[in-house]
Structure formats: structure tokens, C-alpha cells
Amino acid sequence: SNEIEAKQIIKPIKEKIKKQFNTYIFGEDEDTLASVLVSELNDRKQSLAFAESCTGGLLSSSITGIPGSSKVFKGSVVAYKNEIKSSILNVPDHLLRQYGAVSEEVAESMVIGLKTTLKCDWGIAISGIAGPDGGSDEKPVGLVYISIISPNNEIKNIKKIFNSTRNRIDIQRLSVNECLNSLRLILLSNKD
């Protein structure tokens, strides 16, 4: 008969759905992946930093758009060129030559360098081919490597290939969402 009564009726069903599908449901109403991460990291008193290549700062922007993000976000390195990957993130030149900038090995080295440089609890590094050019049979447009490092230096590497018929901005946005959701799922599995 009214909104309060409706909310009371739906509450146990809503809780059951949230519990059963917690890996798929990250929030409700105005929540975003970024806002949920900022809140969770703030509750944990942990910091976050990024090393971005193919997303060119879009990942950082998704976090800094959230009020209160300065409590958890330390900063980022937009390492678009290999020289920056080497000089600021300490990615060894031999890894860049042997595997290429878009590789699991380089993304992992980027996140290790990021954690050392920015002294963050959690770090995410991303490198990929957003297109429309630059792809090959071996490394197609839409290929993205993500490395996430935890406070105890455990590293999770993720390889994604987003549909190459998507445009550059779509691939960048999908990459950002993949980074944020992957960290959310790691945090979810490490609840105290």
C-alpha cells in the first residue's frame, strides 16, 4: 500500500539475491564500480594506484570522479611510451624487446614498479591495443593485459580480448570496467 511496506516485503528477497549473486551485484541505486571500490578501500584503510598505458588516464579518472577518492587514491603513471615504462616504472628493456609492451610480462613488471614507486597497498597496471590500428594476428586490437598487486605482493594477471569491431573508446571503457571489477572481486574474496 506504500513504499515503506513495499521495501519491507522485498527486503528478505533482496538480501537473498544479493547473497546468492554477490559476484554479479556490486551495488544499487547510484553505486558504481568506482564508488564501491573507493568505499571498500576506505573502510580497509588501504591505498590504490594505477599504471596505465592503453587507457591513457581513463582508469584514474573513473576513481578521481568519486567524492572522497583522495582518501585512497595515491595517483597514477600514464606510461604510454616504452621510455616511461622503463624510466619511471622500472620495466626492464629486455622484457619490452622480448615480449612487447602489450604482454603479461610487461604488465606484471609495470605493477611491481608502480607499487615500489608510489608505495600503494593495491596497484593495477594495464597495457593493451585499443585500436583501430596496431593489432596483428598474434596481438589483435582489443587485447588487454591487466596485473593487480595486493598488499602482500601477490599478483593476479588477467588477459582479455575485447571484440575488435568495437571502437577505441569502447575498448578503453571495457578495459577500465574489467580493472575495477577484477579488483572488486579480489576484495570480495578477501573479506575479513
Image (cartoon, rainbow, N blue to C red):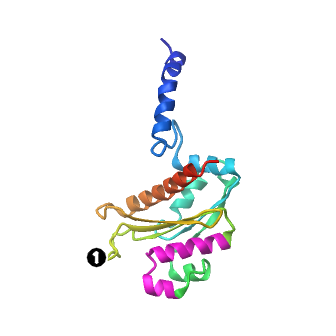
| Residue occupying image coordinates x 57% and y 70% | 111
Q: Is 40 drawn above or below residue 170 in the view shown? A: above
Residue 51 is inside the magenta segment: no
**Rendered location of residue 89, percent (x, y):** 60, 77
Mark 1: amino acid? Asp
Image mark count: 1
Residue 103 is covered by the magenta coloring: yes
Dot 1: within a 10 Å radius of its alpha carbon, few (fewer than 14), some, or many (20 or more) residues?
Answer: few
* Relative depth, front residue between 179 and 44: 44
Residue ID at (31%, 61%): 163
Which residue is at 49% across, 53% downward? 181
| Left or right, 137 with reference to 38 | left
Residue that mark 1 sits on: 137
Callout 1: SS: loop
Left or right: 121 as drawn, with respect to 1: right
| Magenta stretch bounds | 94-116
Q: Residue at x 51, y 18 (%)?
A: 3
Above or below 20: residue 83: below
In the rendering, at what x and y percent does residue 79 appear? Answer: 54, 74
Q: Main secondary structure of the magenta part?
A: helix
Q: Position of residue 126 (x, y in %)?
A: 49, 68
Question: Residue 143 sits in which quadrant?
Answer: bottom left
**Placement of 108 over or under 9, stated as above or below:** below
141 to 98, vertically: above or below: above
| Residue 102 occupies quadrant | bottom left
Rendering coords of residue 120 (x, y %): 67, 64
